[in-house]
Amino acid sequence: MFKFKRLLFSLTFRINITMFVLLGILGWGFAKTASYLLVSISNAHQCFSMSSVVTQSIDEHLLRIENSIKASALTSQTKYLTESNSRTFCDSVRSIVGVDSVYINIHRDEQPRVEKGLRQVWETGTSIWTEPHKDNSGNIVVTYLTPLQNISGKTYAVLCADMTLGWLDELAEKERTTERTVISVRSKDNIFIYHPEKDKMLHPADSADMAVTEESFYEEPLKKAFWNSNSTTTETVSEHTGWRIHCMIPARDHNYLSMIIL
């Protein structure tokens, strides 16, 4: 009888220990999963905050340039500008607006780097930003094109303003929250306008650059968020230019929460 009770006690003890271990494992797994989701969501909000600030700053900067150049272009309605008589005008616009170079295009086929954009401006009379390209000095630039029109509204030339992209580097560095956070900007044609790895500039982005998986937890027409075990990424789209601002935070780069849990 005594042996039976001791055996029963031993069996009950082992069952209790096993249950305790199982509950501990389940509890740890639940806490790990919950913490992972919390970190991902927190990082996503942080990414959205960064990309939203960058997007707004980009739009404000570009809009200021556009308005200044369009205002300058209006003067061409009272003075017919040509490539020969416009040097003083272009130099004045460049110094006021703060772009790198300003010039006038009279002939549609003389600027092959921006030929597609020029053709669109000549045909539609609208103003556009071009895809990134290299200027005569080898600098990577985007060009703002706006029509020069006479009083009757007919386009007779295109005012072109080249802008280098160093200010995007300064803007991204200002907003980055950790050393490994990556902020990049792509044009409407998926070409890198800015990337911290300079060799990616002027190249199209691929899935590896974006680090996007199908594990999407937030998506709107102008906002997307994705996560995996390594990082959280978000993407916002500028309504003004169509440029895509992409932010990535490695999972372990979150603040105190990731330091404690992961």
Image: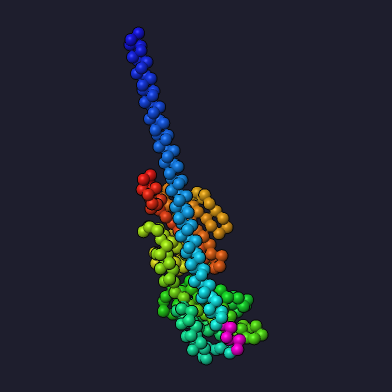
Expressed as whole percent of the image width and height from the top left, the position of residue 112 reads: 51, 78
Return the residue found at the far right: 152
Q: Give me the residue at 41% from left, 41% from top.
A: 32
User: Observer-nearest residue: 243 or 60?
Assistant: 60
Image quarter of the N terminus: top left
- Majority secondary structure of the magenta segment? helix
Identity of the residue drawn at 56% across and 79% down: 70
- Residue, far front: 256
Residue 249, image x, y percentages: 42, 55
Q: Is residue 185 magenta?
A: no
The residue furthest bottom is 85
Residue located farthest toward the top when viewing the structure as drawn: 1
Residue 77 colored magenta? yes
Q: Nearer the viewer, residue 88 or 125?
A: 88
Vertical position of residue 159 compared to residue 9: above or below? below
Q: Position of residue 43 (x, y in %)?
A: 44, 52
- Coordinates of residue 22 in the picture (x, y in percent): 40, 30
Inspect this view and state whether residue 5 appears.
Answer: yes
The residues colored magenta run: 73-78
Question: What residue lies at 35% left-to-right and 15% top-to-bottom?
Answer: 7
**Can residue 210 be seen here?**
no
Name the residue located 42 percent from the left edge and 62 percent from the top edge: 175
Quarter where residue 11 is shown = top left
